[in-house]
Image (cartoon, coloured by chain):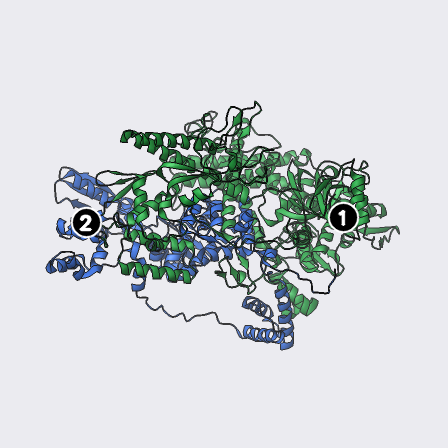
Amino acid sequence: MTIRGITKRIGSIKFSCVSPEEIRKMSATKIITADTYDDEGYPIDMGLMDPHMGVIEPGLRCKTCGCKVDECPGHFGHIDLAMPVIHVGFIKDIKMLLESTCCQCGRLMLSEDQIQARRESMDKMEELGGGTIEVKNFSKETAKDASGKGICPYCGCEQIKIKLDKPTTFREVEDNHKLTPKEVRERLERIPDDDLVTLGIDPSTCRPEWMVLTALAVPPVTVRPSITLDSGDRSEDDLTHKLVDVLRINQRLRENRDAGAPQLIVEDLWELLQYHVTTYFDNQTSGIPPARHRSGRPLKTLTQRLKGKEGRFRSNLSGKRVNFSARTVISPDPLLSINEVGVPIFAARELTVPVHVNEHNIAKIREMVARGPAPPNDNPYLPGVNYVIRSDGRRIRVTERNCADVSEGIDIDYTVERQLVDGDVVLFNRQPSLHRMSMMAHRVRIMPGRTFRFNLCVCPPYNADFDGDEMNLHVLQSDEARAEARILMQVQENILSPRYGGPIIGAIHDHITGAYFLTHNNPRFDRFEAANVMFKLSDIEMPAPFIDEATGEPYWTGKQLFSTVLPADFRTTFKSNICQNCSVCRKEECEYDAYVKIRDGQLLCGTIDVKGIGNSKGKILDRIARDYGSDRAAQFINQVTRIALGALMNHGFSTGIGDEDIPAEAALQISNHSQECIDKVTDLVQSYQDGTLAQMPGRSLRETLEVEVMQVLGKARDEAGRIAGKHLGMTNPAVIMAKAGARGSMLNLSQMAGCVGQQAVRGERLSRGYWDRTLPHFEKGDLGAYARGFCSNSYKSGLSPTEFFFHAMGGREGLVDTAVRTSRSGYMQRRLVSALEDLKLTSDGTVRNTIGTVVQFRYGEDGVDPARTVRGKAIDLDDLFAEVLGDRADELLHIDTKDIGGDYGSLEKDEMEYIEEDESEDYDDLDMDYDGGGE
Amino acid sequence: MAKKDTMKALINRDVSEETAALLLTRYNTLSAISAAGEAELVDLGLSEEEAASIIAKIGKRPASSSSKAKKAVEEVVIEPMEEVTEFYEFSEGELRLKRISEEVRTEKGLTVELPMKIIVDIAARIKNADFDDGICRQLIETAYRMYTAHLMDQNESAGVMAAHSIGEPGTQMNMRTFHYAGVANINVTQGLPRLIEIVDARRVPSTPSMDIPLTGIAAEDENVARHVASNIEMTSLLDIASIETDITNMRLIINPDVRKMESKGIRPDDIVERLNKVKAVRGMVEMVGFDIVVSSDEPSYKKLQVMYDAIKGAKIKGIDGITRAVLSKTEGSWKIVTEGSNLKEVLKVEGVDAENVMTNSILEVADVLGIEAARNSIIHEAMGTLGEAGLDVDIRHIMLVADLMTNDGYVKAIGRHGVSGKKSSVLARAAFEITAAHLLHAAMVGEVDHLEGVTENIIVGQPVTLGTGAVNLIYTPRKGDKE
């Protein structure tokens, strides 16, 4: 155990090659036999499983260090190769060295002056802080300049060009003479140290001749453990298999060489040894067949162990497994606070928090330990203790049986691992963790059941739904970690997204419908109803009621009830989502009740919907989070969602297939209109065939037709939607949801009630299938609306068989698109993170990377944190003027409020959404519903 | 340049094969030979006359770009740019506020300056009101307070925040390319593929396109605009004429399509003139009646075919690389939208509002207008792509990515060939991609990893150097302090 608070840090890591001498020196044993175990099942000495190299079986002791399994880290062995072989990983570097140095004297083939100049440049680069990459490129250039010389400038020896026969054979170009690894090694040995430095190689860490192996290091047994199968057979690791091959061939090669076998045989064996050593390092070397297991599976050798997603680096070094974590299915609980998470008792009994025993808490802890690891009664839940760690670091497992004794033995300076209790800080996470809000700190609430539960408002940051999603929970183990989590990671600290400076946590779905019912047109509630709306808000007093003049009964208004959750001095003005964008805004007199005005914490007019409290759009939420702090914002979200649900439950709300019923006359109107459009398309096709269609500039005739047809049919759908929408009216639940921004859009509705519209693949009308037609139901060459994927029916009325097929085509494209998109965007994000992860804001306001290069002199040109911006603006000017000038700001500035408004950029946004809706085909909306259930 | 090519080039210049071979034992390229000078050539065993003639034959050549690039850069004489005289001039009101803000700053001893943008914004709001210095001061002070409260915290991992903010909405974008917004129906890659393309810093985007506003009468008059467009759009011979191969007389007959030529504003003479500049048919093109005839100087089918291939794609008019130019009218003035991009040439075309020409090819912007322009281009393109998809991403994130991509003077990609591949840490590079190669090379040159970045520290199991991990503070209790 380390001393608390002070840990050793690794300063730096130096990489180097190992010389053959060093391999032999560090080797615990020389390995000569290819056999692993003898008949009794004991490892053979000087075999690949020699116990000098560490132990894998419990009970045995390592012959080198005398430690048992888990204590002995393992020790390297070595194989003396009969003949040298080339290390594949360095093949390019060897080639570079051979080409740029003289074959006789080994000098770098540049004149003294040139070498001197190069060295000076390199020193300069180092001085100026050039990275290894620059030096690497520079020395590459040096090597290139030196290579290809006909005559060595030092010894005047004529150079013979060398070519590389992939993967590991060098040949002299002229007579195709093969350079044996031995010759290569001899040449490399001749290169003087000074010239190596010029080529960017540090001779003290890597002499080039070490790249031609004469001794092979054998990794410890612990690196390549064998597994015992159920049948009692041993199954060796891939590396062991490969080493067996190397040893066998090495043995044969040595015997043959010593026996003076013909040159040809020796060379063949030598090459075979080279093959085995090559595949031992990298079994995916191009140019040679991969070594295979008996079953035909390619072996996983050294390089394969390291690289790739499942490799050592990405899987075990960059990502680590942890204890004190839990994973289970999630489910919603609207009555939890947004920063709480419901943890099942089951999980809470397994997850522990270490508590240091001191004189103040010892009595309590003794009581807790005495309870044992599983107190029988779960109601109320009382935490037990799973482990006790004594001052000397010994762990004692607390059991039913020993809990009383252990409890007695607890002393100051012990640490106990107690089970979770309400209020513990834990991290909660859902994959894919795409942004920092995918992992937030919650407070624990122990609950019965078997799922994690949390408030629905927290779904958007996690991108969670409850169709079977699972989430992870991590219990923090140190005070530092808990403090950090509480200050930086708690849910309320993350209400404002750093992506766009607006709230990402806020009311969703039913909350918004509820708020709409509570505030739209200011409904009245009698005592009973008002209590119904408010009863979940325990810490809010009912405001004083109005008195009805006619009856003398007290009543409350919706806006009044809503105002109870607002901060007392809150003020803002904006337009709701239901705003119709009239040409002249009548403000307070708005006929749709869409102009929201809040003064002194009282909602004076307007409807609260997604633009007020919704996630990402909610203006009230935005302002509270910014001006009143995160805790107040969390409180507001908790309260506003409860009051909204109260209102919704009081009102009652449901939607069903009946909501898409439209009167017969409307249906007739729609079908008439779509028939008209279809006729128009027929006319267009006719004129195309006659050649009378007017060609658009820069388009072929066919393209012109397609564009025009798409336009006509697009209008057909919109018109159908408009007619349907007109007949559905603002009392229709589906319309309310769409207009208030709770769920669904008018496009969804018009497809259900009006007409599904044109189906598209790759943004064009459907055209593929059979020759010149999409389905055999149509004539060849038919370009009409129905033949090319127009669905004139609605989802409600039901699609015809051909329409159904076309719809499936469009839908399939959407699914494929989603699948492709996730992988592509995942890789893009991985690259972005890898490129940007090291950048940080330094104390002088600059953004720098690890080596101190300035990337930005001032972060974002103004140093402002995007999460604290007001939708990208450094400060909110409206706030500024309101604060300095008070309510008279607008008059004083002589500006019409319309120009500035509290409604930044909403018009552009709306227009954009409109265009988007127009452009995107139906499946874009559909795939949202499809993505569930696939966990 | 390979030796073989050099050999060819020397022989082309009437240097005997022997001499050439001799030269090649020492020099790889023509430029190397000319750089060596006569004296060195004499050393090689040539007579002085020979050496002189070789040098003369090769002529003065700029050093080849591959190995002598650095040298070449030094040699280029940088012409002084035209001095920029038109700056944005701050108005009286803006300057007054700036003065007040400076006063407030020195008075309070603040280290950060209030950004000019905020001052300008405030000035714009109060320009109609007549405020005395007192109120202005109050405004500035409040603005200062708000601004400093919104500053980013020290040691904040700005990079990760940017990467998340750009990457996360990527999952919500669509893969399709759709039509260009507006009248001009030119396909432009949008959505995720385009975003990937931008961070990849591709040399040529998958759908290069330019947006060319016009000035002067061209902006007003459709016909003039059309003329400008025809000067921009590349027209090849086959676009305006058909070619017949007359085997009996061994010649090619070009039949110009009068209507098409008229619409492009090309006269037959232009074609002749143009074609006469094409190497394979130089001086063999002439008008015969309404047709243009290209006669072969040697009676061989091969030659005829060579000629045909040479002229069929010959550029008659327009700018290389621009395959289509479509007119569109926005806000009362004409502009041209193109398929294909060639910024350098388009800027020279008359009638083009050169200052406002846009291209979506970032590398081209970097080449023509410099690295700062490329940075702005990245920001503009990325913001546009995200905006088109209806996604709201703070511009600061994109700025950071753009700055990182351009901060050492040329455009680097985000990925293993660019930023990630140039990291200073071996472990970080190995953990990203091409693991084995990085480790082996590190071993060869004896690289040292100082564990300063994020990945390295995670690998060795230490706190990272960002955020709370950046602070190294150990509390040492004073003597006498008990508990």
Which residue bears the numbered disc 2? B7
In the rendered structure, the answer to whether residue A705 lies left or right of residue A465 reads left
Residue B418: give its label. Answer: none
Q: Crowding near pointer 2: few (<14 within 10 Å), some, many (20+)?
A: many
The mark lying in front, picked from 1 and 2, is 2
Amino acid found under the numbered disc labelled 2:
Met
In the rendered structure, the answer to whether residue B394 lies left or right of residue A197 reads right
* Residue A792 versus residue A22 in the image, above or below: above
Residue B297 percent across, percent down from the top left: 12, 45
Q: CA distance from mark 1 to mark 2?
A: 87 Å
Residue A254 percent across, percent down from the top left: 35, 32
| Quadrant in the picture for the C terminus of chain B | bottom right
Q: Nearer the viewer, residue B193 or A686?
A: B193
Which image quadrant for residue B313? top left
Residue A686 percent across, percent down from the top left: 42, 34
Chain B shown in which color?
blue
* Residue B56 versus residue A350 in the image, above or below: below
In this rendering, do the residues under marks 1 and 2 share a single chain? no
The answer, for residue A285, to whether it is visible in the render is: no
Mark 2 — on which chain does it sit? Answer: B
The answer, for residue A666, to whether it is visible in the render is: yes
Q: Nearer the viewer, residue B420 or A795?
A: B420
Residue B285 percent across, percent down from the top left: 17, 48
Amino acid found under the numbered disc labelled 1:
Ile
- Residue appearing at x 24%, y 41% in the figure: A173
- Residue appearing at x 56%, y 44% in the figure: A319
Which residue bears the numbered disc 1? A643
Chain A shown in which color?
green
In the rendered structure, the answer to whether residue A342 lies left or right of residue A128 reads right
Q: Nearer the viewer, residue A513 or A151?
A: A151
User: Disc 2 on helix, strand or loop?
Assistant: helix
